Image: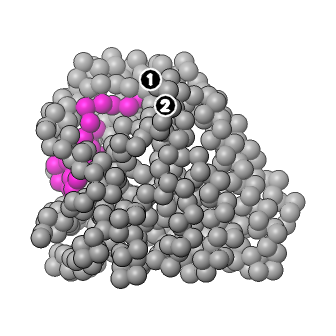
Amino acid sequence: MNTFSAKDRDILRALAETLAAIAALPIQRQTADEWRRLNALSAGRPLVWINEIPWHEMDVNGELALQTTHPFCRGVETQLRQTIYQWQHLRGDMVVEDTFYSPLAIRDTGFGIDEDVDVIHQDPKGQGGIVSRTFHPQIKDERDLNKIKMPVLTHDQAQSEETFQTLRSIFGDILKVEKRGIIHSWFAPWDELIRWYGVEEAFVDMLERPQLVHQAVGRLVQAYLARLDQWEALNVLSLPSGNNRVGSGGLGYADELPAPGFDSGRVRPADQWGCATAQIFSDVSPEMQETFALQYERRWLERFGLNYYGCCEPLHNKLDILASVPRLRKISMSHWADVDKAAPRLSGRYVYSYKPSPAVLATDTWNPSEARQMLRAVLDKTRRSGCQVEIIMKDISTVRYEPQRLWQWAEIALEETRRR
């Protein structure tokens, strides 16, 4: 890993210096405080964050073009360039830290079953973006449940230390370099299970073979919990800085974390944010979601200090059952959610984590007025209800190779959140 060239090192140091200068701006602390305010359910303007960007479409004037040659350096360079680019062009309410995190080398054997899938790329350049998938079911009866294995985890401490020392040798005098393990984990067992079971097959079996469905989701959740227990036992959970995504929402700065009894030498799930989602249950009854999803998800969520629920599914008719989630603080409100129903019920109780439709960025002709109208319509209703709101633009499959669309959307979003 240490065999990269002096040129590679110089490139990374120059980028680190640019990042350090951005991180030193007073606005970084001010914006972090705004996220703490929002996550504490205190009044204030909505905050904006952009995620899941189609980076293969975003380069302008070579700003994202990699110049290093060593694979390790190229990975670091990508991270630095994307952070600087986002700050310069579509920052919203992002926060830039003066720290570069060195990942722990955690090995995971996984769940023992891989998806059997056909993939068709829609991007004519084949570089990413929209794909369609056809999954081939592998779980058809109780015998197939044994395909789901309990993961086995190990921590390669020597590898973790080598990565850490390498990063320090490159730019440790410019940026803080800190080891970091697991700070947040995406928990969506149904998103995983349907890849092996099939969506239609799962719904049919909820009616005709409910016991098999319960056994399948129960076994998978058991595997997730086995992973969480091993993270804790291996002491590879890390305390989040706050400048990290929470669930499918925004940043996780929170004065309530870490939880009481925190030991800086051993981070617990209780010191972190948790999350869960069951997106395929969008159109099922609350009772069915409780029976086949939420009762299992609570086994995970009860371990964490604060929780986020949801992603792209509309949840305005599920708020009664979500009240059972311990320490729930944020609820995803996709563009399919009914704002009139949801806003009054979230006000003062949960952050309204609004997800505008990314389709507005993918039209044949970019229409910034339409984008503004869509945002304003939701913000007016949530403002009248007194909601604490975050605006999360995510799942951006394409900007039609016109990155300026997303730049302008970020400007519009900030203007609308500051409008009185």
Q: Is disc 1 placed on a helix, strand or loop? A: helix
Which residue corresponds to the image point at 24% horizontal and 60% vertical from the top-left?
43
Amino acid marked by disc 2: Phe
Residue lying furthest right? 143
Q: Quadrant of residue 413?
A: bottom left
User: Camera-side residue: 155 or 232?
Assistant: 232
Q: CA distance from mark 2 to mark 1?
A: 27 Å
Which residue corresponds to the image point at 71% horizontal and 67% vertical from the top-left?
197
Confirm whether the magenta stretch covers residue 93. yes
Which residue corresponds to the image point at 59% horizontal and 51% vertical from the top-left?
302
Q: Is residue 367 visible?
A: no
Image check: 100 left or right of 45? right
> Does label 2 or label 1 sit earlier along the sequence?
1
Q: Where 93 falls versus 277 (above or below)?
A: above
Q: How many marks?
A: 2
Disc number lying in front (2 or 1): 2
Q: Is residue 255 visible?
A: yes
Residue 323 place in picture, x, y as percent: 53, 66
Q: Quadrant of residue 22?
A: top left
Q: Quadrant of residue 66?
A: top left
Amino acid marked by disc 1: Thr
**Which residue corresponds to mark 1?**
163
**Which residue corresponds to mark 2?**
262
Q: Where 38 falls versus 236 (above or below)?
A: below
Q: Is disc 2 placed on a helix, strand or loop? A: loop
User: Camera-side residue: 405 or 254?
Assistant: 254
Residues drawn in magenta: 80-104
Say which quadrant the N terminus sits in. top left
Residue 400 place in picture, x, y as percent: 28, 69
Which residue corresponds to the image point at 12% horizontal and 70% vertical from the top-left?
420
Residue 135 place in picture, x, y as percent: 65, 68
Crowding at dot 1, Cα within 10 Å, few <14 / some 14-19 / many 20+, comes out as many
